[in-house]
C-alpha cells in the first residue's frame, strides 16, 4: 500500500517513525460527463474572469474571499510560517476510554505503518499499551494544509488512526427528534427487541453493495451491445396503520429470510371497545325493528282485508 504521509508518532519522549496509509478504498463506479449526441468528453477550462482568457495551472494560486467580496491573496509562503508543531508529527495528547468518542466525530480511517527497523520496538510498545489499557489515544496531526484531530486504536496487530472532526464541527441535533408527547408501550418495545435480536445475527462480511453489482451488469451488457437486464422495482413501503401488526410481520419476515420458524408469540388482543359493541348493537336493533315493522305491516294488512268486508255488509243492510 502506498503511503500518503510520512512522519512520526510523538508518545511522550518516545518518537515512532511511521507511514500513513489509507485503511479504506472506494469501489464506487464513477462516470464521465459526455455530450449526449456523440459521447464526446466534456472538459472544464479555467478562465480568469477579469482577463476573460484561459489560464494554466502554474498561474493559479489561493485567495480568501472577504464578506464584501474582496479577494485576499494567500501564498504558500504565508502558510509555511504558520505555527503548526504537528506538521510532521502525530502528537498524542491524551488516552481515553473508547466510548468517550462520539461516532459522529469519526472521519477518514488510516493505518499507521512502522517506518523501518528502528520503529518496530516503540511501535509494538504503543500497540500493547493500548491493548492492555482498553483505551484509545487522542492525537493532533497536520494533513493537507490544516491541523486535525485523530484517534489511535489497535486493529489486529496494527495501529489504526481515525480522523476526527473537531467538537465544534458537529452540529447539535436540535429540532430533529419528534415531540416528546409520543409514548411507546412495553408490548411494542418487546416486539422491537425481538426484531432487533433477529436482525442482529448477521456477519458484516456477508453484506455487499447490490446497487454496484447491478450497475456493473448494466455496463457489461451495454458494452456487449445487449439490452441491460431489468431489475425488479423495490416494494413501496405502506402506511403503518397498526404498529403492533407491523412489528409482528417484520419479525416473521426476518425469521423466514433466515430459514427459521416464522412463529411469532402473539400478544393478547385488545378487548372489544365500547365503540365496536355500539356499532354492532344498531344492527341488531335494526333487525329487530325490521321484524317488528313486518309484524305491524302484516296486522295492518290483515285489518285492511277485513274492513272492506264490513263495508259491504253495512251497505246491504241500509236498503232494508
Image (cartoon, rainbow, N blue to C red):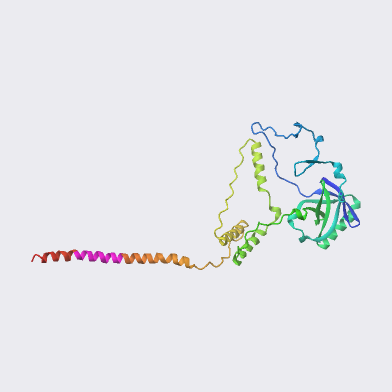
Give the x, y percent position of residue 94.
84, 59
Give the x, y percent position of residue 137.
82, 58
* On screen, residue 293 above or below 55: below
Closer-to-camera residue (57/65):
65
* On screen, residue 250 above or below 222: below
Q: Viewed as shown, does residue 52 lie left or right of 10?
A: left
What is the span of residues highlighted in magenta in the rendered image?
294-307
Closer-to-camera residue (216/96):
96
The residue sitting at the left extreme is 320
Question: In the picture, which quadrant includes the C terminus?
Answer: bottom left
- Give the main secondary structure of the magenta stretch: helix
Residue 214 shown in magenta: no
Name the image quarter holding residue 15: bottom right
Q: Viewed as shown, does residue 230 lie left or right of 118?
A: left
Q: Viewed as shown, does residue 132 lie left or right of 179?
A: right
Name the image quarter holding residue 228: top right
The residue sitting at the front extreme is 68
Look at 64% across and 39% down and name the residue there: 221
Amino acid at each position: 500500500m502506498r503511503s500518503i504521509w510520512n512522519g512520526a508518532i510523538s508518545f511522550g519522549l518516545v518518537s515512532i517513525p511511521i507511514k500513513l496509509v489509507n485503511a479504506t478504498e472506494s469501489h464506487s463506479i464513477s462516470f464521465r460527463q459526455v455530450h449526449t449526441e456523440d459521447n464526446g468528453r466534456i472538459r472544464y477550462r479555467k478562465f480568469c474572469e477579469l482577463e476573460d482568457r484561459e489560464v494554466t495551472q502554474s498561474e493559479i494560486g489561493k485567495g480568501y474571499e472577504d464578506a464584501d467580496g474582496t479577494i485576499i491573496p494567500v501564498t504558500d509562503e504565508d502558510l509555511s510560517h504558520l505555527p503548526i508543531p504537528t506538521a510532521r508529527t502525530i502528537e498524542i495528547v491524551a488516552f481515553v476510554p473508547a466510548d468517550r468518542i462520539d461516532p459522529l466525530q469519526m472521519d477518514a480511517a488510516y493505518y499507521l505503518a512502522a517506518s523501518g527497523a528502528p520503529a518496530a520496538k516503540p511501535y509494538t510498545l504503543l500497540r500493547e499499551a493500548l491493548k492492555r489499557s482498553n483505551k484509545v489515544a487522542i492525537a493532533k496531526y497536520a494533513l493537507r494544509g490544516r491541523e486535525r484531530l485523530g484517534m489511535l486504536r489497535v486493529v489486529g496487530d496494527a495501529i489504526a488512526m481515525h480522523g476526527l472532526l473537531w467538537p465544534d464541527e458537529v452540529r447539535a441535533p436540535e429540532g430533529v427528534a419528534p415531540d416528546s408527547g409520543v409514548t411507546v408501550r412495553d408490548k411494542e418495545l418487546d416486539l422491537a427487541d425481538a426484531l432487533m435480536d433477529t436482525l442482529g445475527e448477521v456477519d458484516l462480511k456477508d453484506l455487499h453493495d447490490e446497487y454496484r453489482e447491478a450497475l456493473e451488469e448494466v455496463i457489461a451488457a451495454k458494452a456487449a451491445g445487449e439490452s441491460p437486464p431489468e431489475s425488479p422495482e423495490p416494494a413501496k413501503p405502506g402506511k403503518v396503520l397498526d404498529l403492533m401488526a407491523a412489528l409482528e410481520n417484520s419479525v416473521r419476515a426476518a425469521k423466514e429470510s433466515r430459514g427459521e420458524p416464522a412463529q411469532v408469540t402473539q400478544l393478547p388482543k385488545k378487548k372489544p371497545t365500547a365503540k365496536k359493541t355500539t356499532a354492532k348493537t344498531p344492527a341488531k336493533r335494526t333487525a329487530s325493528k325490521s321484524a317488528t315493522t313486518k309484524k305491524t305491516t302484516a296486522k295492518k294488512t290483515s285489518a285492511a282485508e277485513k274492513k272492506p268486508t264490513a263495508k259491504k255488509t253495512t251497505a246491504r243492510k241500509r236498503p232494508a
